[in-house]
Image (cartoon, helix red, strand yellow):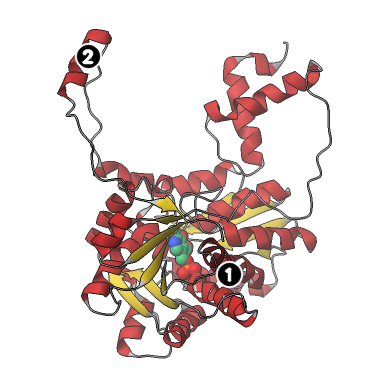
């Protein structure tokens, strides 16, 4: 039969699957190194060497780019705008990786064999990846309408996917009941897991460090349950107490208008977040109709920091994904809401034009591909031969598309 890696189909399938077992989502062309390595070792060209897996379950998350954009600053109406891109800088393509790394590490440390969560999609694919990496099994519960790419990722990483009827908050209530019932011995990396908070606060460390320990006036974060906003604030407060920074930014939540319990509570001046009737939105990952106690914490964070909360329409969200694409950033609608929210806050006078603002963008465009694909037209015509190529080239207008824009923050 020979070496299965010698057969082209098996060659790629084997390597991509092995990478998926490690929690890495890689296309066949990108996986050839893993396919080639055993051959190099077998032929003696590469030394056999044991690598130390270490104790931390990591896929190289965090340390994501902080990018300045003059163009978006102008469009949004502020003096200085930075994009913190967890959408393009994390291993599974979303913010969840910076917190799931901590809970997967703890799951292994505590001797669990199964990692579990409920999720609007991104947490599920992240948990599945880190479970794979840690050698744990994984169970995820997602709403029926979760975007397919997130489900595919989770299943490809080997998770047991359970699709559940109903909206996320209903599923969350049932899932928490299951975990608390003691009928399953799973390590829950959902919203109740305190170790995940420690991962979330690293946003603050990275932003402060990359800006040379000069704190921006404001940080905007997409809010579902509100955990990211609250824990980013915690990170900034810790830095201030340690004397690394001399002030903390105003924390501002952005939600899809169709599902905005935190925004609505804040507008009413309420101290507690209440559950609302959820309507469908393009920002499916933010579809948390009842944020519970975390929502109340988010309100406290907004109030204590002098921040704000704003809701954005589906149309505004999709326009924001296009604006980010003009910066070279491929961001899913849920992850792009901050860029939709900022101009509204400026127009209403809640954000001063002189402010320096960090907008966090949180999920890759690949994560909600079906939502983005209809926004472009792929040409039907397929050319052949050099002459046709030349003819097409002659129709392309000359000249620059737009002025150049951004730069990356210097490390402080
Ligand atoms: C893309 C994206 N952005 C932001 C969030 C915000 O999450 P939270 O407010 O619950 O921390 C989520 C949560 O699922 C998400 O998937």
Residue for point 58% across, 74% down: 235
Determine whether 53 is above or below 299 in the image.
Answer: above
Name the spot of residue 53 as percent of width and height, x first: 78, 46
Q: Is residue 181 visible?
A: yes
Q: 79 or 14: nearer the eye?
A: 79
Q: 85 or 19: nearer the eye?
A: 85
Q: Nearer the viewer, mark 2 or mark 1?
A: 2
Name the spot of residue 273 as percent of width and height, x first: 42, 84
For the residues labelled 2 and 1, the Cα–Cα distance comes to 53 Å
> Which of the 4 quarters of the picture holds residue 17?
top right
Please state if 165 lies on the left or on the right of 177 as rendered: left
- Which mark is first along the chain, 1 or 2? 1
Name the residue tied to disc 2: 390
Name the residue tied to disc 1: 201
Please state if 396 lies on the left or on the right of 184 as rendered: left
> Which of the 4 quarters of the picture holds residue 387?
top left
């Amino acid at each position: 039969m020979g070496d299965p890696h010698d057969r082209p189909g098996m060659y790629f399938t084997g390597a991509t699957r092995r990478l998926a077992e490690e929690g890495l989502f890689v296309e066949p062309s990108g996986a050839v190194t893993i396919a080639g390595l055993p051959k190099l070792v077998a032929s003696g060209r590469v030394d056999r060497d044991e690598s130390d897996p270490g104790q931390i379950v990591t896929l190289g998350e965090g340390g994501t780019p902080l990018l300045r954009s003059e163009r978006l600053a102008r469009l949004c109406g502020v003096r200085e705008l930075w994009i913190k891109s967890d959408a393009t800088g994390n291993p599974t393509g979303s913010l969840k990786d910076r917190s799931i790394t901590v809970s997967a590490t703890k799951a292994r440390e505590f001797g669990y064999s199964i990692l579990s969560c409920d999720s609007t999609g991104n947490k599920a694919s992240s948990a599945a990846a880190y479970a794979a990496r840690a050698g744990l099994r994984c169970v995820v519960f997602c709403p029926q309408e979760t975007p397919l790419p997130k489900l595919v990722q989770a299943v490809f990483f080997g998770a047991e996917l359970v699709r559940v009827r109903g909206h996320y908050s209903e599923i969350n209530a049932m899932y928490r009941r299951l975990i608390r019932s003691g009928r399953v011995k799973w390590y829950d990396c959902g919203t109740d897991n305190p170790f995940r908070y420690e991962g979330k606060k690293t946003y603050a460390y990275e932003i402060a460090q990359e800006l040379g320990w000069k704190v921006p006036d404001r940080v905007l974060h997409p809010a579902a349950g509100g955990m990211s906003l609250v824990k980013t604030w915690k990170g900034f407060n810790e830095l201030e107490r340690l004397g690394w920074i001399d002030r903390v930014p105003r924390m501002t939540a952005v939600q899809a208008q169709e599902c905005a319990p935190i925004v609505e509570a804040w507008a009413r001046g309420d101290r507690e977040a209440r559950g609302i009737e959820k309507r469908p939105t393009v920002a499916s990952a933010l579809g948390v109709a009842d944020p519970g106690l975390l929502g109340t914490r988010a309100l406290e964070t907004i109030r204590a920091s002098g921040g704000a909360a704003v809701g954005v329409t589906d149309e505004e969200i999709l326009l924001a994904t296009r604006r980010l694409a003009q910066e070279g950033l491929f961001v899913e609608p849920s992850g792009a809401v901050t860029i939709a929210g900022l101009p509204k806050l400026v127009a209403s006078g809640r954000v001063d034009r002189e402010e320096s603002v960090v907008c966090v963008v949180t999920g890759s465009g690949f994560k909600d591909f079906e939502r983005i694909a209809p926004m472009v037209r792929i040409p039907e015509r397929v050319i052949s031969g050099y002459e046709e190529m030349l003819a097409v080239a002659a129709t392309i207008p000359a000249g620059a598309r737009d002025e150049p824009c951004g730069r990356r923050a210097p490390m402080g």
